[in-house]
Amino acid sequence: MRSPSRRGFTLIELLVVIAIISVLVALLIPAIQQAREAATRTECSNHIKQIMLAFHNYHDTNNGFPNRYSLNGTTLNSGHGWGLKLLPYLEQTPLFNRWNNNKSFFDPENQPVLMTVVPPYLCPSAPNGPRVMDLSVATVTTSTGIAGDYVVFHQITTTGTGATCTLCNTAAPKTAGMVTPINYITDGTSNTIMMSEQAGRPDYYIGRAKQASNAAMTNPKFWGGWAAYQSVTGQGWSNALPPAAGGTHAMNWTNSQGVYSFHLGGANFGMCDGSVRFLSESISLKTMVALWTRDEGDTPGEF
């Protein structure tokens, strides 16, 4: 008697199945990546929302938004940034109480505090986080700390961008030791930016390319730590400003100055009314400058 024949996959059939699976995987990977980015962008937005609520709670207690940095003396090498002042309003009072207010953010005595991860100060889309960075007022490292991915703006540069402002006042005061009462923001709190992302430090990015060194970055040790002077210049980039950008960019060109995020197509911003907006990187610089100014009398229009 003949035993019944058994028929398996032929080589061609196996190759067809593998090809189909490969196509399905290729189709699924972008969808998974988009879903992951959507999730991290939402988490980043939630972090900024927490920070903006802390700004407003600080305002209610102190009759103004906190100054961009605080000095213990008369020079820039004696203080800390707004990130420290908001700790009690982010349920981080024990960490705040460990800080020696007579020492600066780059003093070794405050290093244990700076080396503590404060989750709301980190963007989940930024790579390699939490990132440890060198801290110093000059070039010689004196301490280390965990980098923060969010900044406030204390001045505006429009050189070479075609945008203009007259007063150029922002919601974060230019003078250390001052607060900004909400009634100073006469352009409207929903039309004025308080903070945004400037992610990735101490690594230096131009476009989406990580540079071999951060030596050309503005103050690579003087800000970047979450308790450091996270107060930067609001600006765009054009051929008139280094690095030459081959056009005009409102954000996401470099994390040396201005706005920089790792989100596709834009960045998250905290508005002075406490809301969070995701703005497209194709936004015009004229609109961006109007959003940065607090009392210019300009209207940003739709954004």
Image (cartoon, rainbow, N blue to C red):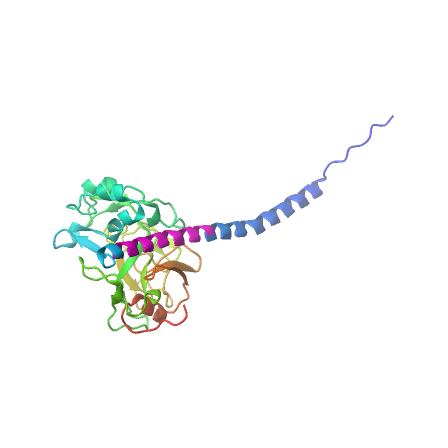
**Eyeballing the image, is 203 above or below 286?**
above
**Eyeballing the image, is 264 above or below 240?**
above
The answer to whether any part of residue 170 appears in the image is no
Secondary structure that dominates the magenta span: helix
Give coordinates of residue 198: x percent, y percent: 33, 55
Query: Which residue occupies the extreme left position in the image?
Result: 74
Location of residue 283 by image quarter: bottom left
Between 255 and 34, the residue placed more toward the observer is: 34
**Eyeballing the image, is 261 above or below 189?**
above
| Residue in view at x 23 percent, y 59 percent | 63
The answer to whether any part of residue 116 appears in the image is yes
- Could you tell me which quadrant the C terminus lies in? bottom left
Magenta-colored stretch includes residue 50: yes
Give coordinates of residue 237: x percent, y percent: 33, 65
Between 106 and 39, the residue placed more toward the observer is: 39
> Where are the magenta residues, as a range?
39-59
Query: Which residue occupies the extreme front position in the image?
Result: 60
Q: Number of marks in the image?
A: 0
Query: Which residue occupies the extreme top position in the image?
Result: 1
Location of residue 107 by image quarter: top left
Magenta-colored stretch includes residue 101: no
Give coordinates of residue 228: x percent, y percent: 24, 50
| Residue in view at x 50 percent, y 51 percent | 35
In screen coordinates, is 156 left or right of 209?
A: left
Give coordinates of residue 199: x percent, y percent: 34, 53
In screen coordinates, is 82 left or right of 15?
A: left
Between 140 and 184, the residue placed more toward the observer is: 184
- Could you tell me which quadrant the N terminus lies in? top right
**Eyeballing the image, is 48 above or below 155?**
above
